Image (spheres, coloured by chain):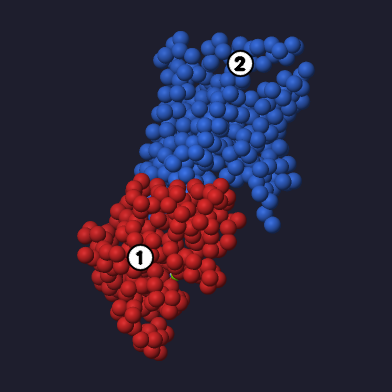
Amino acid sequence: MVWVDLFINGICLGGLYGVLGVGLALVVGVMRFVNISHGEFIVMAAFVGVFASAQLVGVNPLWLLIPVAALFFFVGYVVQAVLFNCVVTAPDLFGPILLTFGFSIVLQNAMFELFGTDVRSLTAGGLSRLSISLGSVSIGVLPLITLALAIAFFVALQLAISRTAFGRAIRATADNRDVARLMGVKPTRVFNITMGFAMAMAAVAGMLLAMRSTFTPFSGLANLLVAFEVIVIGGFGSFWGALLGGFLLGLAQLIGLHFDPDAGIFYVHVAFFAVVLFRPQGLMGIKLP
Amino acid sequence: MKLLEVAGLNVFYGDLQALFEIGVSVEAGQTVALIGANGAGKTTFLKSVAGLIASKRGSITFDGQQVGGLPAEQIAQLGMALVPEGRLLFQNMTIEENLIMGGYTGRTGYWTLPKVYELFPTIANRGREMPFVLSGGEQQMVAIGRALMANPRLLLADEISQGLAPVVVDQIYKSFPAIRAEGTSIIIVEQEVKRAAAASDYTYCLLKGRVTLEGRSKALSFDALSHAYFGT
Ligand SMILES: Nc1ncnc2c1ncn2[C@@H]1O[C@H](COP(=O)(O)OP(=O)(O)O)[C@@H](O)[C@H]1O
Ligand SMILES: [Mg+2]
């Protein structure tokens, strides 16, 4: 029974990791641009969640996901428009890395100045203790909600990208920016909105993560690392691969913790390493000849 | 009335100047051919006019409006469509999605999905397939169809016969009267002089970034053309 328990909880955590990764994957796929400050945005969303729920006593923090996601859509849009677009269109390989790495340090220290190094978490009210029993297995309600949200995000994103006119514009821009422009697509607008979506997903993931574990202003790097591992083992540019990658890492973490309670997210990295070693093209990636 | 008027156009790739003082004009309803050897600057000319190359000097007037400083996406909105050299279909989209993408500007007019399929029956019923399964000629039809979906006033076609069998090229060129009949002017870029001259009203010859000859297509002598083309 302990295995069923571990499996279910691992999948639930994995769904969250999938959301963490897919925002980054979207940005990499559309802009060929890695945002190293992605993890800091995840942490910022968690801080916003903590302070907002302190103001709104009695409101279940799950409801805060919606306004915080909307806020971070706006933040992502603006940051892309005023900052990241300066380097995305440049042919220089180091521009994006230097800019977003520097930006991540600025954000980290700003959060440190404002909030100190206290370890925090977001309390989900009574929700974090609620669970439903299926025979001898008990499943937490919060992890289940997390998984449901993660899957809803993946389905919504997949539909938006495959079925809508703007989704086609995103794919066209990812394929060939100049040809997309010839059809009337303005790439910077596509980039701004894409970053908005990525940040909204980062915000949701950040708040849900803060409900199940703790964070400090310096947790961004660990988040970025997990997000990165998710998209690498998922296979670059594959959304469903990212979800699968998230599941694998979530399972690895919880199974690892079961045998080795002090391991933290060590076994996440072990699983990542194993996949890269034996299947370097990723789980869903196409094997290069 | 002049639909496109390019005057004194100079285009640069960094320090390298690719076009020198180009003057080209297209009347409404006209088909203009632009010929020249590899590296003459034909693609550079089309890209500059379409707004993909920003480092340029000179005047580009489209439909009475100065467009030299506008980006490609805004020029597309005004009704100029480019069929890029090498077709460059969106490989991650179906044929039909490629065509629909061509209509992204929302410009309405004669050209719709059914009309494009009617123009090129060989790609009708294949909308759900991916571009890589099509032959080169069929891919070229999709590329032209995608441009038509924007209901352009001016169609720029860059080496549409490149790498295709002559019968396929004939088939594609046969679609031009139908395109013109809907009020679209065309600039065709070709390396093959005879075909370009036969399909056009007016011809410009480019050599090393300069116009070396121009005139009514019917009136150009083969000697003069080959002289202008090769610079001999
Ligand atoms: N992206 C580029 N960067 C630098 N030089 C270029 C670029 N594209 C084309 N050129 C140069 O500009 C000249 C004209 O090229 P192009 O317009 O492609 O000619 P054509 O289409 O007639 O074959 C050539 O000398 C070519 O080497
Ligand atoms: Mg060319």
Marks 1, 2 in one chain? no
Which percent across, then down, holds residue B33?
37, 72
> Distance of mark 1 from mark 2, alpha carbons?
64 Å
Residue bearing the label numbered 1 = B186
The circle on residue A141 is 2
Which percent across, then down, holds residue A216?
53, 27
In the image, B114 versus A102, the foreground residue is B114
Q: Amino acid at mark 1?
A: Ile
Residue located at (49% from left, 26% from top): A46
Q: Is residue B150 left or right of residue B120?
A: left
Residue A127 placement: quadrant: top right
Q: Is residue A216 left or right of residue B1?
A: right
Identify the subunit bearing mark 2: A
Crowd tier of the residue under label 1, counting other residues whose Cα lies within 10 Å: few below 14, some 14–19, many 20 or above? many
In the image, B159 versus A42, the foreground residue is B159
Does residue A98 appear anywhere in the picture?
no
In the image, B134 versus B12, the foreground residue is B134
Residue A175 vs A274, above or below: the answer is below
Specify the chain shown as blue.
Answer: A
Identify the subunit bearing mark 1: B
Helix, strand or loop at mark 2:
helix
Helix, strand or loop at mark 1:
strand
Q: Amino acid at mark 2?
A: Val
Which percent across, then down, holds residue A25?
55, 41
